[in-house]
Image: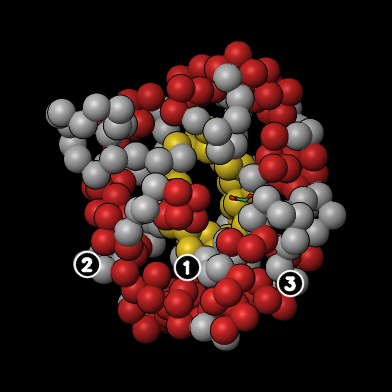
Amino acid sequence: MRRKVIAGNWKMNMTPSEAVKLANDLKGNVANDNVDVIFCVPAIDIVPVVEAVKGTNIKIGAENMYIEEKGAYTGEISANMLVDAGVSHVIIGHSERRQLFNESDEFLNKKIKKAIEHKLIPIVCCGETLEQREEGITLTFIKDQIKAAYEGISSEDALNTIIAYEPIWAIGTGKVATTEQAEEVCASIRKNLEEIYDAKTAEEIRILYGGSVNASNAAELFAQNNIDGGLVGGASLKPEFANIVNY
Ligand code: PGA
């Protein structure tokens, strides 16, 4: 039985003081021991938010990291820094990073490997554009993204990763994928994992849905066979997030 994961993606929202306030407001209401609750927060908010949620079930994730250990990479943040600050998860390959910052599959594969090396759990994002969906190439496109992301990663390491399927057309648009659409792709991703690894590994890896998840659609989405929770953007900044966690 896969344990559900409800991860908030705060994106570029919340100054450090706002972040602490939000964490304090939410923490008492997201105390659900049956699910993994993760706040993925801007880098500058990590230290104060880790402090704010001490003693709760909430885990803290980063939204990005760099592929190198340390050195002359002005402006970047290493896996080591995240771990030392108390981070356990890191979002890798969000479509906003792929599209706005030109992050390629190869580059993201390096990030995933670096995260694993440091025992950070990567939340590996994939998802198609509206054009790709309309062309009917969603499943093959995502299969290629998954294959590229997991290139050279052992099944043992893959077990310590989480996948988030986020159709780009559903992100921040209020246009949620239907449960059938979301389940179809998540089931297909599990098949892809079975082809790359084996049935047992594929069965254990958690696959989340993301894209306009809110308190009214969460329960139906998370009830699907292959959807093991959600990566939540907009609604993770509101009290509503507690209703999603306690769906
Ligand atoms: P959204 O964002 O819930 O605001 O659509 C999801 C995400 O980008 O992770």
Q: Is residue 201 visible?
A: no
Relative to residue 25, is residue 109 depicted above or below? Answer: below
Q: Residue at x 68, y 24 (%)?
A: 22
Q: Position of residue 125 (x, y in %)?
A: 47, 58
Question: In the rendered image, which residue does mark 2 sit on?
Answer: 152
Of the pair 6 and 78, the residue shown nearer to us = 78
Residue 179: assigned label: 3
Question: In the rendered image, which residue does mark 1 sit on?
Answer: 204
Residue 45: assigned label: none
Of the pair 213 and 172, the residue shown nearer to us = 172
Which of discs 2 and 1 lies nearer the camera? The answer is 2
Q: Residues within 10 Å of mark 3 (few under 14, many from 20)?
A: some
Q: Position of residue 86 (x, y in %)?
A: 41, 28
Q: Secondary structure at mark 3?
A: helix
Q: Residue at x 54, y 22 (%)?
A: 49
Q: Amino acid at mark 1?
A: Glu
CA gap, disc 2 and disc 1:
19 Å
Q: Amino acid at mark 2?
A: Gly
* Marked residue nearer the N-terminal end (3 or 2): 2
Q: Residue at x 18, y 36 (%)?
A: 69
Q: Residue at x 56, y 38 (%)?
A: 11
Relative to residue 45, is residue 1 depicted above or below? Answer: below
CA gap, disc 3 and disc 1:
21 Å
Left or right, 125 with reference to 223: left
Q: Residues within 10 Å of mark 2 (few under 14, many from 20)?
A: few
